[in-house]
Amino acid sequence: MSNTVVDKSKVPWWVSNVIVPLVNLTLALLVSGVFVFIAGENPIEAVKLIIYGSFGYIQGFAYTLYYTTNFIFTGLAFAVAFHCRLFNIGGEGQAYIGGLGVFLVAINLSFLPVPIVWLLAIFGAFLFGAAWAYIPAYLQSKRGSHVVITTIMFNFIASSLMIFLLVDVIRDTNQMAPHTVKLPEAIWLPSFEAFSGILGIKIRYSPLNLTFLLAIASLFFVWFLVWKTKWGYEMRAVGHNTQAAIYAGISPHKNIIIAMCISGGLAGLLGVNEILGVSHKIQAGFPAGYGFTGIAVALMGRNHPIGILPAAFLFGILYQGGSEVTFEMPNITRYMFVAVQGLIILFSGALENLFRPQIESFFVKRLNREVSA
Amino acid sequence: MEFLSDIASLINSTLRISTPLVFAAMAGIFAERSGVIDFSLEGKMLMAAFVAAVGSYYLGNPWLGLLLAILACVCLSMLHGFASVTHKGDQVVSCVAINILIIGLTTALAAAWFGQAGLTPTLNEDQRFLEIHLPFADALRDIPIIGTIYSDILSGHYVFVYLAYLSVPLVFWIVFKTSFGLRLRAVGENPSAVDTAGINVFSMRYKALAVNGVLIAFAGAHLSTAVNANFFREMSAGRGYLALAAMIFGKWHPKTALIACLLFGFTDALQIRLQGVELPAIGEIPVQLIQAIPYILTVVLLAGFVGKAIAPNAIGQPYIKER
């Protein structure tokens, strides 16, 4: 191990940012294949089903992009906080509360012109998500309580709070199940079906909607914010070396709060996709694990928007293709894909240096040989 | 006398509910005292619950199930060590990975092997741990006070309950009175000094993680082969995190961590009793609020409104040996 020390400046960017992550992803998927085998199904067949389910027909592909939308939001949410060295594990709860923000704004202001309702609802989602992240951020920076534990606790608390609200306060009293009334149809976000007519494609129902563009815009927003603004610089400085940042006159407290609030806000935007775009009502447990998947997406995408887009797409494929697998293979449930997420976090996060020295030195040696030859 | 027996049964359930927390907190002390963050208590507890239930279902003996659970948890601890000690990966990321992996894997395998609901088969009396009735418990019940304490509070628990409370002085002795414990604490405070003294930092951390794996396995087995007779999806329900909070609140010390665990256990026992009860002046508290009490309590305790917690100095930092 120790004899493979590589001069970092000689390693081409594509080796450390493309080859190494791909090797790690491959390892995670190979181990996943072993799990599928233990569960009593054929891994190769499962891969075929995943590819067919996510690309094989237009509706499936629309579903893939719909999942991608959610993962872009939660992936960005984790990444922003991570640049300040904060582990925001609370994306799940922030998304849940963000959904409440969307719904409350949309149902109360539905008399306003449509695009304004949308903008206000997006703002509501961001604000509610941010507010839910504010408390753990404050406790981390002022009281030193570890943000991982508090955000996890806030996931549990958000779930209790939302179920209380859905059962006792905002439930659609004509229904037995705990969910709200539907929003008026006039303010629903246009779905992919509406656009597909223009493009000349006929498609039955798909959950893909205008929020996808909001997600793409968020990628640019985060890139600009983190790498092109003074605040982004300060935040990364705090994350990289808090003592040095303090010495440079940067307030860790302020940056921790801002980073967590933006992170929570981005997670909250998931509510726009789910409530304004797809189900048009709040259902119990609608974030359905997307918040946790965001961790895997961000770590795989190396916490950069350019990496998060393909990582979110890959998880879109896994989710949509995965539902095809669970439909066809009785022994595979959606929890198998939760395990796959865990493996991806393990190999592209915690074990990211497993083969990095070997791979880097391999490429550096090869490139040197080419230069000298 | 109604009141007295209410109190007795409340204390009885506090002892039972705190048991997995106590094991987990003691496990956490070993890992974190050696300088390795362990948020993966939750995942390991779930893994132990799954393995113990499945193992004892197939092997017909809960002790064999426990043994397998210990093996599984030590393996997970070694995985955590491999990622965060050997490869110097991020310790928190490693824990999050283990937790998510285990939530998925246990439920996926339970569904694949035993049907879509993700439950393992119900264990019969031979396959699970039964309550232990201390000698003369029935005979002594009628003696006032002592009889209540002996028969209604101390007697009639699962073996894990007794083991959990025995583990606290044992952990205290190991961590504070043995040379192993001294090295353990030193590795967590100042690894380079320990290295200079000729002690292998990496092997100390691996040893600490191995003990951590053994202890946390008891917590999981308690859940699936004692209080319940099967494994179900996400049955650890955040207990690993509660225990960690209790450990931090207890300042990485077995005795104070025990008190914090009992406090959590007591609130949980109380919340079960409060459900559906009309309180004077307040009325009935919504059940969701009551269920959220342990989580809210965790946040409040961690916020350190009751004193500041100081972590081992080198916690979370991988040790890099200088050459």
Image (cartoon, coloured by chain):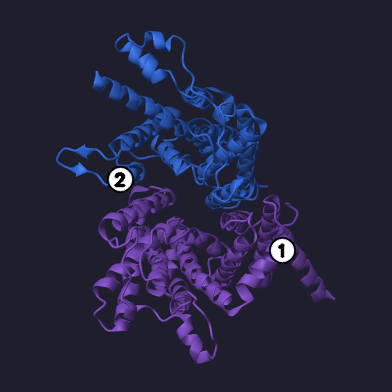
Amino acid beneath label 1: Glu
Q: In the picture shown, does residue A198 fall above or below B89?
A: below
- For numbered disc 2, what is the local secondary structure? helix
Q: Position of residue A233 (x, y in %)?
A: 44, 69
Which chain gets the purple colouring?
A
Q: Colour of chain B?
A: blue
Q: Is residue A151 left or right of residue A300?
A: left
Query: Is label 1 on the same chain as label 2?
Result: no
Q: Nearer the viewer, residue B165 or A245?
A: B165
Quadrant placement of the N terminus of chain B: top left
3D distance between C-alphas at marks 1 and 2: 46 Å
Callout 2: residue from which chain?
A: B
The numbered disc on residue A45 is 1
- Which of the chains bears the disc numbered 1? A
Q: Residue at x 58, y 36 (%)?
A: B53
Rendering coords of residue A351 (x, y %): 63, 54
Residue at image coords 34%, 25% = B9
Disc 1 crowd rating (10 Å Cα; few below 14, some 14-19, many 20+) is few
A68 vs B12, left or right, is: right
Helix, strand or loop at disc 1? Answer: helix
At x 31% / y 58%, what residue is drawn?
A166
Q: Is residue B171 left or right of residue B204?
A: left
Question: Which quadrant of the view contains residue B4?
Answer: top left
Count residues near mark 2 (Cα–Cα under 10 Å), then give few for <14, some for 14-19, many for 20+: some
Q: Which residue is mark 2?
A: B287
